[in-house]
Image (tube, grey):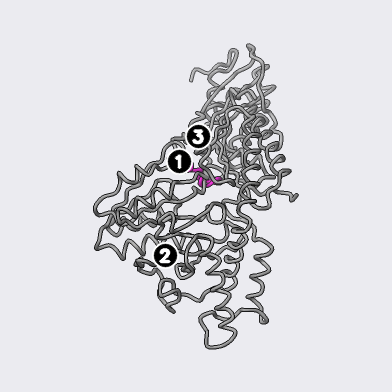
Amino acid sequence: MSDVIYLDNAATTPVDRRVVEAMATCLGVDGDFANPSATGHAPGRRARARVEQAREEVASLVGARPAQVIWTSGATEADNLALLGAARFYRSRGQHVVTARTEHPAVLDACRQLEREGFTVTYLVPGRDGIVQPAQVESALRPDTILVSLMHVNNEIGIVQDIGTVGRLCRARGVLFHVDAAQSAGKLPLDVERDCIDLLALTAHKVHGPKGVGALCVRLEPRIGLVPLLYGGGQERGLRSGTLPTHQIVGMGVAYRIAALEMAADSARMARLRDRLWQGLAELPGVELNGHAVQRVPGILNVAIDGVEGESLLFALPGLAVASGSACATTNAEPSYVLRALGRSDRLAQSSLRLSLGRYTTAEEIDVAIGAIQGAVRRLRAVAPRGMAT
Amino acid sequence: MATLSGAGSLPASDDVVTSCAGDREQGAEVRLQFRVADDRVVDARFQAFGCPHFLAAASWLTDRLRGAGPAQFEAWDWREAAATLEVPVAKYGRLLTLQDAVRAAARNWPGESRSTV
């Protein structure tokens, strides 16, 4: 067990050794280092073959065809390409977009940019469990709505939105449906056809792949129009210019292939560890779960701990790598906008912890984390005026 | 988490002055207690809810004010804690909560030196 127990896998994950080995074969002089667009020579064609193999692996995980996959630098770029690209392309059809107040900043900030460009955006408020009801989406649709954007799994609280129902609703109304699946790909079953998803944003580094690579899965029939964000070499059917990073793309492909093979076992194991963690923390009085109790991804647990201040709690846990309910715990401890949207007070939002598990999290680490958090909470409460009895 | 010196409370008595300031909902709350003998602090305790800088400053204050009298309490300024503990500017507002508690203790000083402020 390392000195610090890593429970921040929702932020990023360590790269799987098998992924590292595959990536290394694309870097050196003896490897597939060539530019995959340089198909006029053998090294270029070999690199291209590796890229296309990865494209198949990524597409396979989400029920798509390889031609639907457009490589990007990550989910943020994929979200931006989806929202800005589609809205700008279909502007003449309508200028209204629907999303939720609890979306990732990659979506919310793109929506704010659309507002600056004259679009109108409806921000749906989820229930106290974090769930956006499909009926809310339906009520928000207008004749000029061109796009709905809803994340599959919330990155802070881990709840799972009913994207299938929303997707079918959008398809029936002729509205494009974009899903940010950064936190769900490789952890929950995904199928763009079954769930009527037109635009699906993916990333590699949340599922033990490398940082700096992602993909946007774009429906082909009928083909979704997108205005590109980058111009240059015309790679990726002109939708995303720039030399393809073979090693990162190959890494994403292998990470997704492993995820597909091991998803069921990993998810079951993580769910058991998450439940063990929750049971341990719930022994403390004044601890509440943030978000829906059942409709959640296996690896994320977010708890509000009454009677302690969030930054002091983190400070008291030097042996744990966890995330707090503050946007920034150093100087400007703004409470999480996601937790506030769920109705949490600023104080409870700030005293919340997100603990996220990964492939390498062990039961021993969970037990140590429970003990550390229980001890820190008891000490901080004891030092507080009118400290809560524990 | 290192043990914070001065954490805890003193049993209520005529020679103990207690002062409170801040609001937990605002992120900082403190309760200071000082045992006074011959017009000087001979023991001090704190209880606090807040960020690590705030807890550290409250702990430091219980040492800093040992031996102090009411005039020093009335004159105590939060900037001393800020400078000594190198508290970041963003946290200065929380130190004002400590100053409020110290001034309140001065107003409630036991015995003949009680302030009329």
Report which residue position mark 2 lands on: A218
Report which residue position mark 3 lands on: A347
Report which residue position mark 1 lands on: A130
Q: Give whichever of B8, A101 is nearer the camera.
A: A101
Q: Which mark is residue B40?
A: none
Q: Is residue A13 visible?
A: yes
From this view, report whether residue A258 is shown above or below residue A318: below
Q: Are marks 1 and 2 on the same chain?
A: yes
From this view, report whether residue A165 is shown above or below residue A236: above
Q: Which amino acid does label 2 sit on?
A: Val
Asked if the residue under mark 1 is in contact with the one under mark 3, i.e. CB atoms within 8 Å, the reply is: no
Query: The numbered mark 2 sits on a residue in which chain?
Result: A
Q: Can residue A326 be seen in this view?
A: no
In the image: residue B42, left or right of residue A312: right
Secondary structure under the numbered disc 3 in the rendered image: helix
Q: Which amino acid does label 3 sit on?
A: Arg
> Which percent across, then down, holds residue A66?
49, 69
Q: Work out whether mark 2 precedes mark 3 in sequence or the reverse, and give the earlier one.
A: 2
Which residue is depicted at the point 35% across and 54% down?
A112
Q: Do labels 2 and 3 share a chain?
A: yes
> Which percent across, then down, holds residue A309?
57, 35
From this view, report whether residue B20 is shown above or below residue A275: above
Residue stretch rendered in magenta on the structure: A327-339
Secondary structure under the numbered disc 1 in the rendered image: loop
Query: The numbered mark 1 sits on a residue in which chain?
Result: A
